[in-house]
Image (spheres, helix red, strand yellow):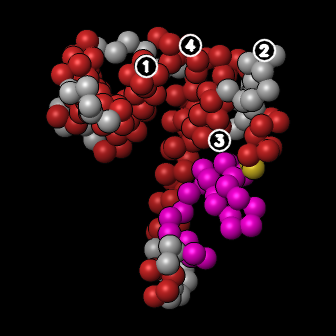
Amino acid sequence: MGYIKDKFKAKAEELSREIKDILKDHGDTRVEEVTVAQVYQGMRGMTGLVTETSLLDPNDGIRFRGFSIPELREKLPKSPGGNEPLPEGLFYLMLVGELPGAEDVEYVTNAWGRRSHVPNHVFSVIDALPLSTHPMTMFSMAILALQTESKFSRAYQSGISKKDYWDFTFEDSMNLIARLPRVAA
């Protein structure tokens, strides 16, 4: 399965149990009062969704898994001789919840390399569009054309259990991220 997917599965199962317990014990508890102004003016100062992956603080800025952007620039692995963190490191942190080592980043890089093949029909879709088509429209159409490769879609049609959705969603996410650079090029 791959050790990163195994780590993700273990984390997801642990969080799922935790959320079930919270809902069982506190599902009817009111969290906070909300004003009409908050609803109409961008939900400022109110919790709209519970997530442990990121936090947008009005004073401190965005934090990813508890780390500020300057902290991540310092702590995440970089290319040899590079000054900026590799995107694979941030992906690993967001997925698994822990800072990656250089070997973790290399694993993600290699996994994406193995998954990067884009089927010819995707390029045919792009080529069929008028030259005046906006590049983001072309990009969006190509992503939609990749749906034919969806492992989740095939599994869903076969009637998989909801508890297994994560597995096929993981595979589709890895495949899509791996293919985006070629589609964009």
Q: Label 3: state its secondary structure.
A: loop
Res 185 label: 1
Question: Which residue type carries mark 1?
Answer: Ala
Which quadrant of the rendered structure holds the C terminus?
A: top left
Q: CA distance from mark 4 to mark 3?
A: 20 Å
Q: Is residue 116 visible?
A: yes
Q: Are marks 2 and 1 in contact (CB under 8 Å)?
A: no
Q: CA distance from mark 4 to mark 2?
A: 16 Å
Q: Which residue is mark 2?
A: 80
Res 110 label: 4
Q: Which residue is mark 3?
A: 97
Q: Which residues are magenta?
A: 44-66
Q: Locate residue 166, reporting x and y percent.
A: 40, 39
Question: Which residue type carries mark 3?
Answer: Gly
Q: Locate residue 12, reporting x and y percent.
A: 52, 43
- Sooner in the amino-acid sequence: mark 3 or mark 1: 3
Q: Are marks 4 and 2 in contact (CB under 8 Å)?
A: no
Estimate how packed mark 1 is, as few (under 14), some (14 to 19) or many (20 or more) residues with alpha carbons within 10 Å: few
